Image: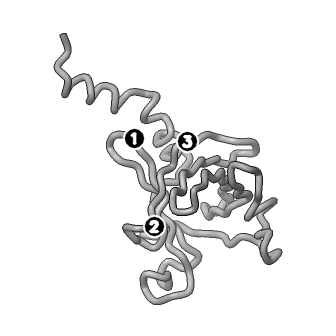
Amino acid sequence: MIPAALLASIIANSPATAASADVARKWGLLGRWAVDCEHTVTKGGPHNLISYEATREGKMFYRRNDQADDINEITDVKLGPNGIIVLTIDVPAYKQTREMGIEMATDGTTRSVYNHDSEGKFSVKDGIFTANGNQTPSLKRCR
């Protein structure tokens, strides 16, 4: 019989659990991203700092501005058409599950190409914010 602690470790590190984190890691998503890394909301600037994080166990999280209360679990990660990465994010504060597609440019910057809730209501469509018609910004990796 396998001891419970060993079994839990095997399950937590199984390919099914770690697959999303592996996809995100290989694509290059993990880390901190901002329009201007030196002038983010957490440093007194106008821009959000976005973090894509993975635990040792393979769980993934989306965090804004290093805030402990603005962190949401990424429940699925997969590759989409044209090299985009597709994230499914559970957002309990808004009682929503959102799907977000992100593209990476040849210079290594990323930008959201779509974002919608589980009912198909888009906040970003074709790289444009639906609320104001502005293009989504390019984010660069922060150190």
Q: Which residue, given by chain and number where applicable, does mark 1 sit on?
A: 58
Q: Residue, x 82% and y 75% (percent of image)?
A: 133
The residue type indicated by label 3 comes to Asp
Tell me if residue 81 comes above or below residue 101 in the rendering: above
Label 1 crowd (10 A; few <14 / some 14-19 / many >=20) = some
Q: Residue, x 51% and y 49% (percent of image)?
A: 74
Camera-near label (3 vs 2) is 2
Label 2 crowd (10 A; few <14 / some 14-19 / many >=20) = few
Q: Check contact, mark 1 vs mark 2: CB within 8 A.
A: no
**In this picture, residue 26 sits left or right of residue 67:** right
Q: Which residue, given by chain and number where applicable, does mark 3 sit on?
A: 76
Q: In 3D space, how far apart are the residues under numbered discs 3 and 2 (Cα atoms)? A: 19 Å
The residue type indicated by label 2 comes to Asp
Q: Position of residue 117 (x, y in %)?
A: 69, 54
Q: From this viewpoint, which residue is outermost toward the top?
A: 1
Dot 3 or dot 2: first in sequence order is 2
**In this picture, residue 137 sits left or right of residue 126:** left
Q: In 3D space, how far apart are the residues under numbered discs 3 and 1 (Cα atoms)? A: 11 Å
Helix, strand or loop at label 3? It is: strand
Tell me if residue 140 comes above or below residue 79 in the rendering: below
Q: Check contact, mark 3 vs mark 1: CB within 8 A.
A: no
Q: Quadrant of residue 116?
A: bottom right
Q: Which color scheme is applied?
A: one colour
Dot 3 or dot 1: first in sequence order is 1
Camera-near label (1 vs 2) is 2
Depth check, front residue: 31 or 101 = 101
